[in-house]
Amino acid sequence: MNFLNSTGGLIYHIRAKRYTSLWSAHRSAVQSFLENWLIDSDEILLIGPSGGYSLPLSWLRSFKRIIAIEPDPLARMIFQSRTGLRPEYLKLKLDLENPDPVIQSFDRAVPILFCNILGQLPVKNEYLAIKNLNTLLEGRSYASYHDVLSGKGIQVRVPTQSNSKKKSVNELRAWIKPEDSLVTREKIELNQHQAYDWFQQAVTNTFEQKFTYWEWAITPSQTQLIEGVSYLQEGIKK
Ligand SMILES: C[S@@+](CC[C@H](N)C(=O)[O-])C[C@H]1O[C@@H](n2cnc3c(N)ncnc32)[C@H](O)[C@@H]1O
């Protein structure tokens, strides 16, 4: 990820500062997503938390030990100054095609949260990336929030009564409306993001992944439809 990339680096920090109030609905959605995850752990591994802009302070404070993977030094400084917390940063990067053995064998009792990082890093061999991701997730609690659809001049209207099942792309598209009433739905150009395909409705042992969706107006003109997926590995406590 490059220094001036809008998904990380300096531009991301400038956006986060500029659009603090625009992002408040997204922050509340992340908070309820994380509170519904119900993990019972004193430790957490955060991947790509940036300056912690989306993460609720009360939730972060519930851990005795925060471990993180975040290669951007400015993000690490901002995280500490915003939250007053000092994660233990691992000196490695997430690379799903060529994973570091430290992360692949990371203590299974520590839940992992992917902080809008999956799908942001370019992946050439998607088959290999998914295989390594599944190895990393096996036998542990995990959660990820990531972009699934995005576009300009759109609004996402997520139904209030939505169950926790994975939604099809067509169901998600039906929630998207043009902001301008003169624009027809067919004229909307949407980007579909890679991480959507990486989590399917799956039952592992007797427990299911839970899915939830929300809108993130990342700038006044650019909107993301976020998928949150969480899995609780019962019987593991840290
Ligand atoms: C889109 S930003 C995260 C947004 C932030 N978590 C939030 O929700 O506000 C992606 C973050 O991932 C970090 N990152 C980039 N490459 C990474 C890698 N290979 N492994 C882990 N983190 C990475 C970036 O520095 C950036 O902070």
Image (spheres, rainbow, N blue to C red):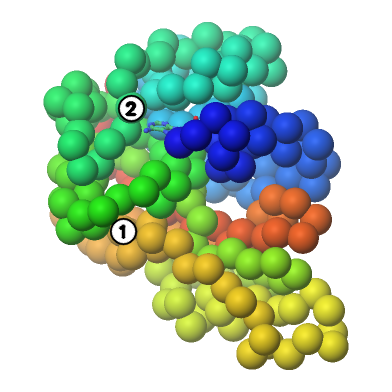
Quadrant of res 203: bottom left
Vertical order, 156 against 238 (above or below): below
Q: Is residue 130 visible?
A: no
Residue 233 horizontal side relative to residue 45, left or right: left
Where is 200 relative to 34, above or below?
below
User: Horizontally, is 75 left or right of 65 in the view?
Assistant: right
In-front residue for pair 60/46: 46
Q: Quadrant of residue 204?
A: bottom left
**Camera sees residue 124:** yes
**Identity of the amino acid at label 1?**
Trp
Image quarter where the N terminus lies is top left
Q: Which type of secondary structure does the marked residue at label 2 adopt?
A: loop
Residue 226: image location, x then y, percent: 55, 57
Kindly identify which numbered label has been placed on residue 175.
none
Q: Nearer the viewer, residue 146 or 38?
A: 146
Dot in front, 1 or 2: 2
Image coordinates of residue 182 in percent, x first then y, are 84, 88
**Disc 1 to disc 2, how far (Cα)?**
19 Å
For image coordinates 33% across by 64% down, the residue present is: 197
Residue at the spot of label 1: 198
- Cβ of mark 1 under 8 Å from ligand 1: the answer is no
Q: Measured from the top left, where is residue 205 in percent x and y?
A: 16, 54
> Is residue 25 left or right of 163 when viewed as pictured?
right
Q: In the figure, 137 relative to 70: above or below?
A: below
Neighbours of disc 2 within 10 Å: few (<14), some (14-19), many (20+): some
Specify few, some or many for label 1: CA neighbours under 10 Å numbering under 14, 14-19, or 20 or more. Answer: some
Q: Is residue 207 left or right of residue 49?
A: left
Query: What residue would you read off at disc 2?
Result: 93
Mark 2 lies within 8 Å of ligand 1 (Cβ measured): yes
